Image (cartoon, grey):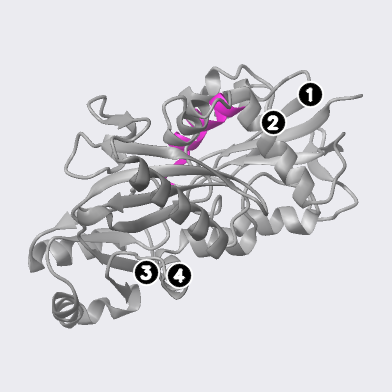
Amino acid sequence: MSRLRVAVIFGGKSNEHDVSVVSAAHVIKSIPKDKYKVICIGITKKGHWVKYMGDVEDIPTGKWAEHRDNVPCVLSPDPLHKGFLAIGEDGKVSQVKVDCVFPVLHGKNGEDGTIQGLFDLAEIPYVGCDLISSANCMDKELTHTILEAHGIITAKWCTMLESELDHLDEKCDWMENELTYPMFVKPANCGSSVGISKVSNKQELKSGIKMAFSHDKKVVVEQGVVGVECEVAVMGNDKPFASTVGEIQAANEFYDYEAKYQNAESKTLIPATFSKNAIEAVREQAIKAYKAMGCCGLARVDFFLCENDTIILNEINTLPGHTPISMYPQLMAHEGISFEEQEDRLIKLALERAGVDYE
């Protein structure tokens, strides 16, 4: 049987580009080469798409973007093409057909449903959540709304639109009436903790809101939660499986971008140092949230475990980090699922959802 062609898409214009390329290198190395032929598609920081044929080791460093053999390409929305159109120096267009797409894109346009809609138009199976669940999980306001409707506890929250900045003082007064300090100010549609700030007074709140608006046109302000941060890796379509719980010991005041990716003092404990009952309860909530949001393929569900084992859901990441030290692959590895088997299962889940017989 010939190998299936899997296009790994990485990079992008998102402010999480640098995380994406590290994740992509890990995914490309982990995909079983006896089953799949990997086609690398990079999106530069300026948004240019290229078919990359260089060394995988040059992807995390950014050298890939300047490789002399890069071929400009686009993903055709026409189902007849079943893949990409590569554009040669002479202007000649050639087809690059694929059987599945593995998007390793974080943040804007990558995990918010945008590119998933393009895959749907092209009728190409793809790893991860569909357009609607991706969009709903990316938007923190919508996530709060849907989860609360399903009886899942989240932090108390308020929202604000960029168009309301002229009334910032009044909005802050309203937030202070609804919530108590400390608060966390978050862009509604960013991942990897980009643009998040912890605030303890009105001046910090105003500054945090202004900073968050540099990343998004909508901001969510959440009540600070006192508890232990923890995460669960979930994999599956109709019958998802939840890993054990991983516990976070952040080097910084909270698990921000720097603590996640740049500070070696941050630690993750697998399994978490919780009671057996607490671990099982968190796992159950992860599955409940995964189903409530309509997720498929994979997601990482993040929580706080508070006093009296109260579980508060923080967020759901539909394309979680896949760097060698990221929590998702580490949690699944703890369950006895190797990196290679993880990628194999994710590709098969994508094909199953699309009704493709891959045997």
Q: Disc 4 on helix, strand or loop?
A: helix
Q: Which residue is mark 1?
A: 35
Q: Is residue 39 magenta?
A: no
Q: CA distance from mark 4 to mark 2?
A: 31 Å
Between disc 4 and disc 3, the foreground one is: 4
Q: Is residue 18 left or right of residue 1?
A: left
Precedes in sequence: disc 4 or disc 1: 1
Pointer 4: residues within 10 angstroms few (<14), some, or many (20+)?
A: some
Q: Tell me the amino acid under the disc marked 4.
A: Leu
Q: Are marks 4 and 3 in contact (CB under 8 Å)?
A: no
Q: Position of residue 144 (x, y in %)?
A: 40, 68
The residue lying toward the viewer, choosing from 215 and 222, is 222
Q: Quadrant of residue 224?
A: bottom left
Residue 298 seen: yes
Q: Tell me the amino acid under the disc marked 2.
A: Asp
Q: Is residue 19 above or below residue 350?
A: above
Precedes in sequence: disc 4 or disc 3: 4
Q: Position of residue 245 (x, y in %)?
A: 40, 40
The residue lying toward the viewer, choosing from 134 and 67, is 134
Q: Position of residue 148 (x, y in %)?
A: 41, 72
Q: Disc 2 on helix, strand or loop?
A: helix
Q: Are marks 2 and 1 in contact (CB under 8 Å)?
A: yes
Precedes in sequence: disc 2 or disc 1: 1
Q: Tell me the amino acid under the disc marked 1.
A: Lys
Q: Which residue is mark 2?
A: 344
